């Protein structure tokens, strides 16, 4: 059986009928099913989703907030998560067994989350504990797989978001002498630096080479950063900032902390997706902004603020490719299968993994 036959067998290939439908027909079907299912259906949509999908979202927000809203929505039997795989996993972890979580397109993954798999993490932990003993506490960005969240929960750690990373890193240092920060090195580095930890006190764990990248006595290491990154935010560069400064001297630059340390250091402001949205919402009319985050969101912010001059920090940036997997066609297909009573593209985290993952999430929520 070749790969295409396998995909067909697993029902992961979009049926041709959806490609033959007009946009108006697709939108009408979504509206019909939403009306038919009513409160039994909940569609959370991440900020980075396309407008064609966001228009049907019952709530928009970052990944954790949407998972929490899914947990709070006790009426919803079907949660169609318009985001990427790890987000739907988190929603499944937090919701009840009677609720079902779906991902409209199973190809919607996250390159950052995929940069830390559980096998690499177990090997890393074994080697790092050989080097540092029982002095390390693991933290993971919520942009990680359920298996990684579970690992962190099992070893006493917690999840973090870009909004509460400072608070969670401070909490972690009250527990242990060192932290292992997965899977985004840039968020970990920017957070630790903001808290007064020097760059020469941070090491990088290379999961491909299975080795610690650090120069100097390892006793100095306080933070071990997993060598992972966001493929979108790493594409904002110092050169982008220099160009904006030269072209628009009065323009403020605001970026996400998943950008590199150099980019964050040269920007005027840095913060989570919600931080960026609120900063623009509260900005004066006529103010000028260059935003360093995902293009779908930047375009939406530009549309919502015609009274301000807003550009992308990198005008050649593409939208997040995996987020863009979720489109109107796949959303319609997913809703029609639910209407037909078919469990299609169901996201289900195994109970033993979910138990420790929820522990990691709850440790964070208690601190927040």
Image (cartoon, rainbow, N blue to C red):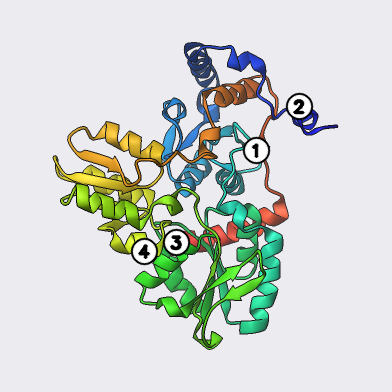
Do the residues under discs 4 and 3 have CB atoms within 8 angstroms?
no
Q: Nearer the viewer, mark 2 or mark 4?
A: 4
* Mark count: 4
**Distance from label 3 to label 2 (Cα)?**
39 Å
Q: Secondary structure at mark 2?
A: helix
Can you identify the residue that label 4 sits on? 262
Q: Position of residue 86 (x, y in %)?
A: 58, 47
For mark 2, does the 10 Å Cα neighbourhood hold few (<14), some (14 to 19), or many (20 or more) residues? few
Mark 4 or mark 3: which comes first in sequence?
A: 3
**Distance from label 2 to label 1 (Cα)?**
28 Å
Q: Is residue 153 above or below residue 130?
A: above
Can you identify the residue that label 1 sits on? 98
Q: Position of residue 326 (x, y in %)?
A: 54, 32
For mark 1, does the 10 Å Cα neighbourhood hold few (<14), some (14 to 19), or many (20 or more) residues? few
Mark 2 or mark 4: which comes first in sequence?
A: 2
**Distance from label 1 to label 4 (Cα)?**
47 Å
The quarter of the rendered structure image containing the C terminus is bottom left
Q: Is residue 267 above or below residue 323?
A: below
Can you identify the residue that label 3 sits on? 187
Q: Nearer the viewer, mark 3 or mark 1?
A: 3
Identify the residue at image location x=30%, y=37%: 301
Q: As drawn, which residue projects farthest toward the right?
A: 1
Q: Position of residue 172 (x, y in %)?
A: 49, 73
């Amino acid at each position: 059986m070749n790969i295409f036959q396998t995909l067909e067998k697993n029902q992961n290939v979009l049926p041709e009928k959806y490609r033959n439908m007009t946009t108006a027909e697709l939108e009408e079907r979504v509206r019909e099913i939403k009306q038919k299912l009513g409160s039994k259906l909940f569609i959370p949509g991440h900020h980075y989703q396309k407008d064609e999908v966001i228009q049907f979202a019952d709530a928009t927000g970052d990944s954790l907030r949407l998972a929490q809203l899914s947990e709070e929505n006790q009426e919803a039997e079907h949660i169609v998560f318009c985001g990427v795989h790890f987000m739907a996993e988190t929603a499944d972890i937090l919701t009840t067994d009677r609720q079902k979580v779906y991902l409209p397109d199973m190809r919607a993954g996250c390159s950052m989350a995929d940069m830390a798999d559980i096998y690499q993490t177990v090997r890393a932990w074994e080697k790092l504990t050989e080097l540092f003993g029982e002095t390390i506490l693991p933290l993971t960005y919520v942009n990680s797989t359920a298996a990684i969240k579970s690992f962190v929960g099992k070893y006493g750690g917690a999840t973090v978001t870009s909004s509460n990373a400072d608070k969670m890193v401070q909490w972690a240092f009250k527990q242990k002498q060192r932290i292992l920060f997965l899977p985004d090195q840039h968020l970990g580095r920017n957070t630790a630096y903001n808290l007064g930890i020097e760059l020469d006190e941070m090491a990088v764990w290379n999961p491909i080479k299975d080795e610690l990248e650090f120069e100097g006595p390892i006793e100095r290491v306080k933070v071990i950063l997993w060598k992972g990154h966001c493929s979108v935010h790493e594409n904002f560069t110092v050169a982008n900032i220099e160009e904006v400064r030269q072209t628009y001297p009065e323009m403020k630059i605001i970026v996400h902390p998943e950008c590199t340390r150099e980019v964050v250091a040269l920007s005027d402001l840095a913060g989570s997706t919600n931080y960026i949205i609120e900063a623009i919402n509260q900005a004066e009319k006529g103010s000028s902004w260059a935003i360093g985050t995902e293009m779908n969101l930047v375009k939406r912010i530009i549309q919502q603020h015609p009274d301000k001059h807003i550009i992308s920090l990198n005008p050649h940036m593409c939208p997040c490719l995996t987020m863009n997997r979720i489109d109107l066609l796949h959303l319609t297909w997913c809703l029609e299968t639910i209407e037909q009573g078919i469990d299609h593209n169901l996201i289900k985290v195994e109970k033993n993994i979910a138990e420790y993952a929820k522990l990691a999430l709850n440790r964070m929520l208690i601190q927040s």
